[in-house]
Image: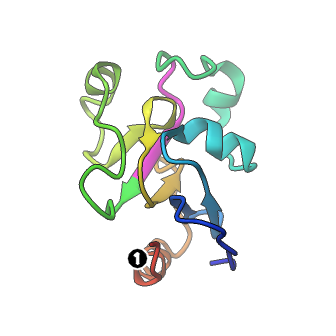
């Protein structure tokens, strides 16, 4: 993971696929932070037809790995409950997710992650704060 200089106790989002830690404000939308920081949220389908953050296209999937504490993210929205019914429990729609404290995120969890096990172990081993 890259080095991150922190000026305050703002939440950190650790993006595993990208190997990057990003600081954000408490209460920020996960999709907005990811896009602002240059993270690739979308596969081909999402690039061609994402809804712009309304929760309708269900293409901004993220996997939340080992949520650091209860309440680190906003609860699943009604839209997520409906749209993610047949998806893994740790999947969220980035556009519907509010960051309250530090978390570990895998973008595009539907795509294979090279060396997934070791990368996830390394991400979990490093302190988030």
**Nearer the observer, 30 or 117:** 30
Magenta span: 57-63
87 to the left or right of 61: left
Above or below, comparing residue 43 to residue 109 in the picture: above
State the image quarter where residue 82 is shown: top left
Residue ID at (25%, 45%)? 89
- Answer whether residue 41 is visible to the viewer in this image: no
114 to the left or right of 80: right
x and y, in percent, of residue 25 in the image = 57, 48
- Answer whether residue 107 is visible to the viewer in this image: yes
Q: Residues within 10 Å of mark 1 (few under 14, many from 20)?
A: some
x and y, in percent, of residue 88 in the image = 28, 45
Residue ID at (44%, 72%)? 129
Question: How many numbered marks have been drawn onto this rendered protein structure?
Answer: 1
Above or below, comparing residue 5 to residue 71 in the picture: below
Residue pointed to by mark 1? 124
Q: Residue furthest front?
A: 8
Q: Quadrant of the N terminus?
A: bottom right
Residue ID at (47%, 26%)? 58
x and y, in percent, of residue 98 in the image = 44, 38
x and y, in percent, of residue 103 in the image = 43, 59
Residue ID at (69%, 79%)? 3
Above or below, comparing residue 20 to residue 50 in the picture: below
Colour basis: rainbow
**Nearer the observer, 26 or 116:** 26
**Nearer the observer, 58 or 5:** 5
Kind of element beneath mark 1: helix
**Nearer the observer, 74 or 93:** 74
User: Is 53 within the magenta?
Assistant: no
């Amino acid at each position: 993971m890259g080095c991150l200089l922190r000026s305050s106790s703002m939440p950190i989002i650790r993006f595993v696929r990208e190997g990057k830690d990003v600081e954000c404000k408490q209460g920020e939308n996960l999709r907005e932070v990811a896009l602002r920081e240059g993270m690739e949220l979308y596969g081909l389908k999402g690039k061609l037809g994402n809804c712009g953050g309304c929760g309708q296209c269900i293409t901004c999937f993220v996997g939340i790995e080992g949520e650091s504490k209860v309440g680190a993210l906003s609860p699943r929205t009604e839209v997520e409950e409906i749209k993610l019914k047949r998806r893994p429990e740790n999947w969220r729609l980035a556009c519907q997710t509010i960051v309250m404290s530090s978390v570990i995120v895998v973008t595009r969890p539907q795509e294979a992650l090279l060396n997934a096990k070791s990368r996830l172990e390394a991400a979990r081993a490093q302190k988030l704060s």
